[in-house]
Amino acid sequence: MSTATKARHPRPQEAEEGEECCERLMKKLAIICSKGSLDMAYPGLVLGLAARNNGIKVVLFYTFWGMDVITEKKVDHLLVSPLCTSMPMPKMVSVLPGVGHAVTAMMKKKIESLDIPKVRDLLDLLADSGAEIYGCKMSIEMMGLKREDLVAQVKDVVGANEFFYLSKGAEIIFI
């Protein structure tokens, strides 16, 4: 596992026992992932993995454009939207053909140089750690997808009501 996926800071030092310290943290985290660009795939995955590394139960729910992150044909081909980056670039330049691919190539090169796992690898790490990954039933229907179009790490496809049941008692983050 790369250093990017390991905790960079130890748990709070005021507790001698790791379990005692962990008890003060939240017990469950639900992350709603609604964006499907390369740069927006990482926050939910990294937060989910950090939570699992601290013994917190994690439920990830991919909806709308976030479905790209868990769609088999798209997961390895996510792009960065040049309109939504913090890169210093005039908006007029960001809409030119090929700029999105160039920005994506730059980000992928930076990710690789920092030894940060790829999106698919983070999905594997999360699933292996016990995190539950779900796709949104309404989004799948709207996009004409089927369950078999999703990556193997997806536990199930659920509606919004079932997501709320699965995330009962969780802190919820919307990305």
Image: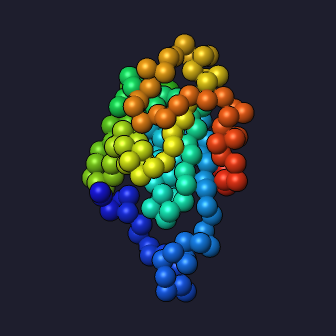
- Vertical placement of residue 115 versus 122, above or below: below
Considering depth in this image, is 146 or 93 the residue closer to the camera? 146
For image coordinates 50% across by 52% down, the residue present is 48
For image coordinates 55% across by 51% down, the residue present is 58
**Residue that extends furthest to the top in the rendered view of this protein:** 144
Q: From this viewpoint, is residue 81 visible?
A: no
Question: If the image is split into quadrants, where does the N terminus sit?
Answer: bottom left
- Vertical placement of residue 82 versus 11, above or below: above
Task: Count the marks.
Answer: 0
Q: Where in the figure is residue 104, as x and y percent of width and height? A: 38, 36
Q: Where in the figure is residue 95, as x and y percent of width and height? A: 50, 27
Asked where in the image residue 103 lies, by quadrant, the reply is: top left
For image coordinates 67% across by 53% down, the residue present is 170
Q: Where in the figure is residue 68, as x and y percent of width and height? A: 48, 28
Considering depth in this image, is 130 or 47 the residue closer to the camera? 130
For image coordinates 41% across by 52% down, the residue present is 129
Q: Where in the figure is residue 20, as x and y percent of width and height? A: 55, 78
Q: From this viewpoint, is residue 104 visible?
A: yes
Question: If the image is split into quadrants, where does the C terminus sit?
Answer: top right
- Vertical placement of residue 123 versus 10, above or below: above
Q: How is the image coloured?
A: rainbow
Left or right, 101 with respect to 137, comes to left
Asked where in the image residue 75 lies, by quadrant, the reply is: top left
